Amino acid sequence: MTWSPIELVSKKLKGREDVINFASGAPDPKLIPVEDINKALHEIIEEDIEGALEYPGTGGLAELRKEIREYLEFLGVSTSRKEIIITAGAQHALNIIANMFLNEEDLFVAENPTFIEAFLALKHYTPRYRAVRVDDKGMVTGELEKIVKEENVKLVYTIPTAHNPTGTIMSYERRKQLIEICSRGNIIIVEDDPYRPIVDSKIEPLTNMDKDGIVVYVGSFSKIIAPGLRIGYILVSRELVEKIEQLQQLDFATSTLSMHIMLKLFKYKTPYKAMKQVSREYTERIKLLLDLLEDHMPPNTEWTKPKGGFYVLLRTDNLNMTKLLDYALREGVAYVPAQLFYIEKPDPRTARLSISRVNKEEIEKGVKILSNIVKQYSA
Amino acid sequence: MTWSPIELVSKKLKGREDVINFASGAPDPKLIPVEDINKALHEIIEEDIEGALEYPGTGGLAELRKEIREYLEFLGVSTSRKEIIITAGAQHALNIIANMFLNEEDLFVAENPTFIEAFLALKHYTPRYRAVRVDDKGMVTGELEKIVKEENVKLVYTIPTAHNPTGTIMSYERRKQLIEICSRGNIIIVEDDPYRPIVDSKIEPLTNMDKDGIVVYVGSFSKIIAPGLRIGYILVSRELVEKIEQLQQLDFATSTLSMHIMLKLFKYKTPYKAMKQVSREYTERIKLLLDLLEDHMPPNTEWTKPKGGFYVLLRTDNLNMTKLLDYALREGVAYVPAQLFYIEKPDPRTARLSISRVNKEEIEKGVKILSNIVKQYSA
């Protein structure tokens, strides 16, 4: 095990509130639906605080599972012939899934670059993996097809919608190809989809195209409600439910209180209301960031052009963005060096910029500082 | 993976509120310090609800770690040269520890019988284990010594204080022997100690006798505060801290809100106050149960004689207590068939009786029903 680059930068940032934070992928605390959470807590205190403080058991509260099912349908995620299991956040879900499917001799495939914390969880169970490139249409499925011909692939991990760290949305064509390749090879697809509620696109999730029960879909309320509650979920074919619940016995980590809070929030329709507000705000920020990069960055600097989500991947002409981080911090701006998101051929010229913790003024100021650094060091 | 017997019985008990519940090892909801938790929630809402809803990071809130250190010292657990790490409950802690120390070829030792949910977590990482008997002085260290001579043991799992399911407290002599054997062999001891705050005994924990940093100590607030918060902790030598924190990146499961609640409760001294109240009540119940068993059980029925904790292990002369469970449920009393707590030579004549969810009247009524069943079927 090593530290994820996100944790590393967040350790460096501790106590540095003066810095413009393009590093954090955590949602803006100002966008947390605090009033509704307060109301939920008050009602839980009055009605059934004891019930909210009992052992969680496995699988999660039945009523909350039902609410999440409706919520997913609203998001365009078909839940027919599948079941919901509640977890202590999406990362906890990914760890359970990795633990379930991957043995030491198994091989998995992930996008390159990819969300490194999920990758570390997968790699914890097997050292064997292959990387597939991401371009502006998402995972390059042609590369996957080649790998599948050469190797016995057990599982493919993908973030098809608002990919981390590139922000890319996988095209419909690529999605269809990915499903076809994996159906033929009986390969599990882990569809990590935390950004769907904040992305203004009704693009079909992979799980909807899944006729063989090979897609394990993972989501979370961290981006639209609050990450500190640690509530995520798995949507999975019925045959796998019991096995996942048995794996939950290993840690019983899901907070009962958090599940009761989420259940209350669903009674108030908070996830639906929050989603609208929050996605509008984040989408505006991404647009602003893209416009400002266009205005200020020197030529030969490239970046991805996401329609939503949190991230833009920036690539400089020839600067080592990992080495430049400490200087950038001194100048008052933070990012995550994206080199460490690469699981193959790390590209030190890249940086992940996130808009989740910066307001519009900060984006404006931050891009100017960053472009000055890039210009200064490129010269 | 299989279902733990505790989960199995709890599934059978769903909706059966008429049954006298000697099965559950969950604390009595009536003993949860509800008023203090309510106060904590109100104060968190007013002061820093956003902070309580952020990502947890690894290791846990620094302030809470400090409070837990003081609390452990108060409990007679020396924290010098060791560090605290906060987890999503003790089971989550045990899973992280098992994941860290056990590889597929490693061999671990556990008591027979033992807390089966912890055992399942250990066994998930390696199928290789050996069992050591528990008698009225705790783990029979002579048996461990023999195993250590024959095999390369990596880790010993023990619940020395108010053992689950026998209720036994390991004697001081045995504790010293256990430490000596493991120090010589450089064997990790996992000391699972959730009952210390409710047991009226200042017997020295193994971690206090640990000169070589081989004891990993695990505790929880589930028994004196509330299990639904999912807050536990690991006390471990400093060299292991970073590795454990890196493993926490795999799931990031600890609820930030729950940590903030616990921190507030420490400000009010709730754990100290709750501990006193709760341990008095549970100790009275255990005494009552032992007296009633003495009065009502037929000859040739035996049981352990714990001084505290939740559990008594009952052994009938020749009845299959696993098969009798459904009948007992119809008669209005539930227990956990203890056969499944045995990791070797399962004894179907045994039952685990817990006093955590039954009041004094229920204990009286329940023992009568149970003794009638035993008499009827023994005849």
Image: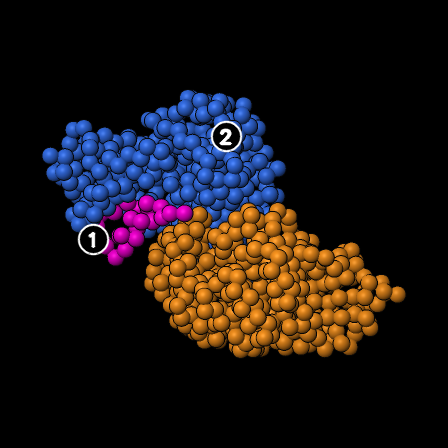
Chain colours: A orange, B blue
Q: Which mark is residue A131?
A: none
Residue drawn at the location 64% of the way across and 48% of the way down: A2
Disc 2 vs disc 1: which is toward the camera? 2
From this view, report whether residue A332 is shown above or below residue A73. above
Which residue type carries mark 1? Answer: Asp
Which residue type carries mark 2? Answer: Val
Percent coordinates x, y for residue B139 in the rendering: 39, 28
| Horizontal relation, residue B130 to residue A335: left or right | left
Q: Which mark is residue B18?
A: 1
| Horizontal relation, residue A162 to residue A36: left or right | right
The earlier-in-sequence mark between 2 and 1 is 1
Front residue of this view, candidates A95 and B308: A95
| Horizontal relation, residue B319 to residue A307: left or right | left
The quarter of the image holding the C terminus of chain A is: bottom right
Residues rendered magenta in the picture: B1-24
From this view, report whether residue B46 is shown above or below residue B12. below
Say which quarter of the image contains residue A175: bottom right
Percent coordinates x, y for residue B26 in the rendering: 34, 47
Of all chains, the one bearing label 2 is B
Percent coordinates x, y for residue A282 in the rendering: 61, 73
Task: List the single residue furthest toward the front.
Answer: A149
Is residue B212 in sight in this rendering?
yes
Residue drawn at the location 68% of the way across and 74% of the way down: A305
Q: Secondary structure at mark 1?
A: loop
From this view, report whether residue A206 is shown above or below residue A57. below
Residue drawn at the location 17% of the way across and 50% of the way down: B330
Residue at numbered disc 2: B153
